[in-house]
Amino acid sequence: EPEVTQTPSHQVTQMGQEVILRCVPISNHLYFYWYRQILGQKVEFLVSFYNNEISEKSEIFDDQFSVERPDGSNFTLKIRSTKLEDSAMYFCASSVREMNTEAFFGQGTRLTVV
Amino acid sequence: AQTVTQSQPEMSVQEAETVTLSCTYDTSENNYYLFWYKQPPSRQMILVIRQEAYKQQNATENRFSVNFQKAAKSFSLKISDSQLGDTAMYFCATRLWGNNDMRFGAGTRLTVKP
């Protein structure tokens, strides 16, 4: 069964460093998303991406964040200068159409900023 | 703004019994979607069931069913004949029609006991 895959599963980075989280969405999906879940808190929407551009973003997704689909398969989230409060699980998701249809989530990348 | 509240941080149920997870939400919109996602210990979130707000009939998926009360803004999940594999975090989520920003509740950790 096709699935969304995320790498790495766990990333530790020093505060102020840039980090790139990688996702491979399901191949025929057109909509891509990033969510994060700070430990013990809710899953929060970060950004959605369609047709090679951001379609929506939350107030969390500030200038420190960027997304890219560098080739036909990868979807990346870059955090330019990490802060301690960026420590969280980051989930990638994809869907064939907009999220009224089923969104498939990856297993997440646990980012720890030290 | 949409908010989603799951008032039960943790629940447990005996195998083969029935359990109901509660979810309430707040929105001023009329057209939206409601979801229950399951996040097993392996961390990948899986869609359990989906309900369109314009549909009066409650959605069912095998052992999973919802009790959707639109006026009360309530969307509870009933799991019948609970199985050990149902042990997971369960997230309730809403999404407005035409919007990719899916809002999640804080989650309910369900443990099915043998």
Image: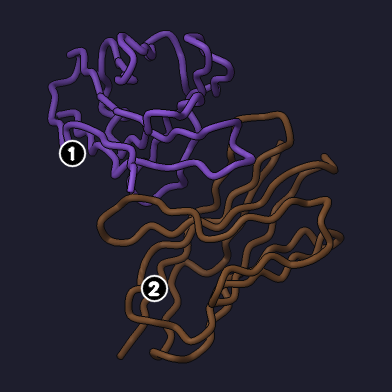
Chain colours: A purple, B brown
For the residue pair B105 and A25, the one nearer the viewer reads as A25
Residue B46, given in percent of the width and then of the height, sits at 43, 54
**What residue is disc 2 on?**
B86
Q: Residue at x 52, y 33 (%)?
A: A96
The chain carrying label 2 is B
Image-based side of A25 in relation to A58, left or right: left
Q: Are marks 2 and 1 on the same chain?
A: no
Indicate the amino acid at tag 2: Asp
Please indicate whether residue B30 sits to the left or right of residue A70 in the image. Answer: right
Give the camera-side residue of B41 and A44: B41
Residue at left offset 29%, top offset 28%? A23
Residue B66, how many percent across, how many down?
66, 69
Is disc 2 placed on a helix, strand or loop?
Answer: helix
Q: Residues within 10 Å of mark 1 (few under 14, many from 20)?
A: some
Secondary structure category for the residue under label 1: loop
Say which mark, if any, is on residue A9.
1
Label count reads 2
Residue A16, quarter of the rendered image: top left
| Chain of the residue under the numbered disc 1 shown in the image | A
User: Are dots 2 and 1 in contact, CB under 8 Å?
Assistant: no
B9 in relation to A92, above or below: below
In what quadrant of the picture does the N terminus of chain B appear? Answer: top right
Q: Is residue B45 above or below residue A47?
A: below
Q: Label 2 to label 1, Cα distance in Å?
A: 23 Å
Q: Residue at x 71, y 37 (%)?
A: B96
Residue B28 in picture, x, y percent from top left: 83, 41
| Residue A15 percent location from the top left of the image | 18, 20
Q: Which part of the image, by quadrant, shows the C terminus of chain B?
A: bottom left
Is A85 displayed left or right of B8 in the figure?
A: left
Q: Amino acid at mark 1?
A: Ser
